[in-house]
Amino acid sequence: MAMVARGLAVVVHHGRSAVQANELVQQIQTSGGRALAVAADLSEPVGAAATIFQAASELGQVTTLINSASVFQDRALTDVDLDHCQLHLSVNLLAPLFLAQQFARQLTAGQRGHVINLLDWRAERPGVDHVVYTASKAALCSVTRSLAQQLAPTIQVNGISPGAILPPEDRQQWHQQRAENTIPLRRTGSPKDLIHAIQFLLDAEFITGEILHVSGGEEL
Ligand SMILES: NC(=O)c1ccc[n+]([C@@H]2O[C@H](COP(=O)([O-])OP(=O)(O)OC[C@H]3O[C@@H](n4cnc5c(N)ncnc54)[C@H](OP(=O)(O)O)[C@@H]3O)[C@@H](O)[C@H]2O)c1
């Protein structure tokens, strides 16, 4: 809804959550905004990017791309296989890359645009867990900085590195303990904190290639 308040028409991409995506579209339309939902499996990143932008063209030119979808699975090295790696790299790295490609292609010359990639502060300080996920986010960090240079001066490309925002379903207690033990601001964040960061980046005309941490300082 924050994007609707900025006057943007919204393309709501979903994988399995068709019901929730359609409800959101309905909510936006009821409030007077324009929106549509599109299903695409990001584990097939080239086809998914084409599908999403084809659907999006119904609402006109896309001027803001927010890459948020991800897979987040933890496996010990002994259990890592090629499927696990391909899934993380396709959804977390290649989908944002090919979506940025489609995004840049459909913008008319001189039209300004924003790409915002959702990263993870762990990408810069890998831990013992989530090895492949963390590597995929580290690579997306690199892509963010490269594309910021390649797509300038008209398209700004930035990243947001969240910390403890939403607890993993199976580790609610661990999430709370992070606030007490490792987050300097002694609290977890909320989706509102991410919305503020996105709004800031969309309003910032002289920032590109930046990775903004929304983590309460946990990476420090
Ligand atoms: N939550 C946090 O505290 C936290 C912390 C650090 C970083 N982040 C980053 O912030 C972003 C948003 O976090 P989140 O917790 O909202 O992520 P999430 O719930 O793990 O995943 C977001 C969505 O990704 C979509 N997705 C996954 N695989 C897909 C596929 N093959 N095809 C299409 N869609 C697919 C799913 O959509 P469907 O439900 O429609 O299938 C899912 O709802 C992510 O990039 C995450 O890495 C979050």
Image (cartoon, grey):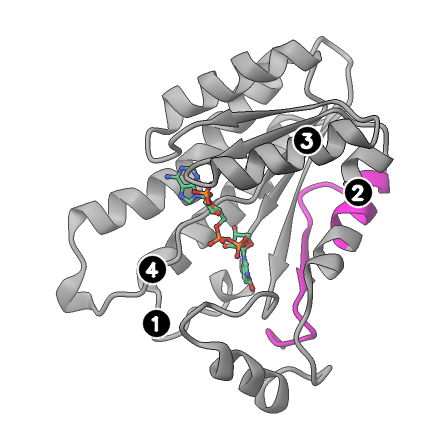
Q: Give amino acid for label 2.
A: Ala
- Asked if residue 128 can be seen in this view, the reply is yes
Q: Judge by depth and name the residue closer to the eye, 19 or 60.
A: 19
State which region is magenta.
Answer: 197-220
In this figure, which residue is indicated by the disc labeled 4?
Answer: 73
Labels 4 & 3 near each other (Cβ < 8 A): no
Figure check: 218 above or below 74? below
| In this rendering, the label closer to the viewer, 2 or 4 | 2
- Asked if residue 153 can be seen in this view, the reply is no
Tag of residue 129: 1
In this figure, which residue is indicated by the disc labeled 2?
Answer: 2
| Distance CA(mark 1)–CA(mark 4) | 9 Å
Labels 2 & 4 near each other (Cβ < 8 A): no
Sequence-wise first label, 1 or 3: 3
In this figure, which residue is indicated by the disc labeled 3?
Answer: 26
Sequence-wise first label, 3 or 2: 2
| In this rendering, the label closer to the viewer, 1 or 2 | 2
Q: Give amino acid for label 4.
A: Gln
| Distance CA(mark 4)–CA(mark 3) | 31 Å
